[in-house]
């Protein structure tokens, strides 16, 4: 990755029931976190995606959203206290630009022909990024690139199936050949697969979920 000049990667995982990294007295006698719908007594420490965190759906891949929304609300409720300690500037910058500057940067988005991936490609293009989109659907990919270009953006599409290693190997070289660099990578290609408890998902099932697009 360093050799390819990839400076930032966003990756969200959570398929192992292992809390050894939490060095706090937070676990009960059965090794389960002591919490109330994901919220613990330790500020800033939350859990989500575990079986029976709140109800039977909590450990299902599609059922964690409700618990995540509850935790987000809890975090937001505590925000005023944090702001009192370090008040925000009167005219705070756009949060998209506060920590990342996309103008002139090159972004790679896998699974970018529809949904979240396509929306991200559109938004980053509006912020001035050059966008490389990959996906299995050729027509949708070309249409999205044409749309971005009509709006004054810069984009390219490579048809690729991330379940095929030989196709995966083409993506970064294509990006470098097209735009000469790669600054950000958004790995969005995935499939929901079978409904399963997050804590009980093994590495093979996890790889299958992240390597295949809808």
Image (spheres, helix red, strand yellow):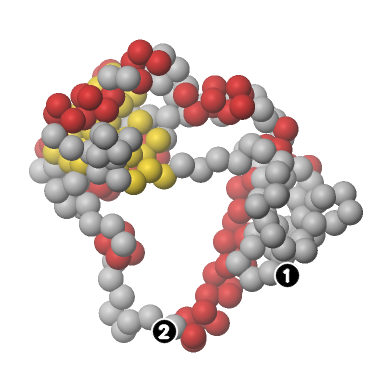
Q: Residue at x 64, y 37 (%)?
A: 15
Closest to the observer, 184 or 21? 21
Residue 10 located left or right of residue 71: left
Dot 2 crowding, Cα within 10 Å, few <14, some 14–19, many 20+: few
Closest to the observer, 188 or 173? 173
Which mark identifies residue 207? Answer: none
Which mark identifies residue 87? Answer: 2
Q: Residue 104, how many percent across, how many down?
A: 14, 48
In contact (CB < 8 Å): disc 1 and disc 2? no
Q: Which residue is mark 1?
A: 41
Q: Residue 21, how many percent across, how many down?
A: 65, 52
Q: Residue 129, how many percent across, how many down?
A: 19, 46
Tell me the CA gap for discs 1 and 2. 24 Å
Direction front: furthest residue: 3
Can the viewer see residue 68? yes
Height in image: 61 above or below 128?
above
Q: Secondary structure at mark 1?
A: loop
């Amino acid at each position: 990755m360093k050799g390819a000049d990839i400076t930032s990667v966003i990756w969200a995982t959570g398929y192992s029931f292992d809390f050894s990294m939490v060095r706090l007295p937070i676990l009960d006698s059965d090794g389960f976190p002591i919490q109330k719908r994901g919220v613990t007594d330790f500020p800033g420490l939350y859990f989500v995606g575990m079986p029976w965190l709140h109800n039977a759906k909590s450990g299902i891949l599609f059922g964690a959203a409700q618990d995540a929304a509850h935790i987000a609300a809890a975090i937001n409720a505590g925000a005023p206290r944090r702001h009192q300690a370090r008040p925000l500037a009167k005219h705070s910058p756009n949060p998209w630009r506060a920590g990342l500057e996309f103008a002139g940067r090159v972004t790679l988005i896998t699974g970018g022909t529809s949904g979240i991936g396509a929306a991200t490609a559109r938004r980053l293009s509006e912020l001035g990024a050059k966008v490389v989109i990959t996906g299995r659907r050729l027509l949708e990919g070309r249409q999205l690139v044409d749309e971005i270009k009509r709006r004054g953006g810069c984009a390219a599409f490579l048809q690729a199936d991330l379940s095929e290693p030989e196709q995966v190997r083409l993506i970064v070289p294509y990006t470098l050949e097209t735009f000469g660099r790669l600054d950000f990578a958004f790995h969005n290609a995935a499939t929901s697969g079978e409904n399963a408890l997050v804590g009980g998902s093994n590495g093979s099932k996890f790889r299958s979920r992240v390597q295949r697009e809808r």
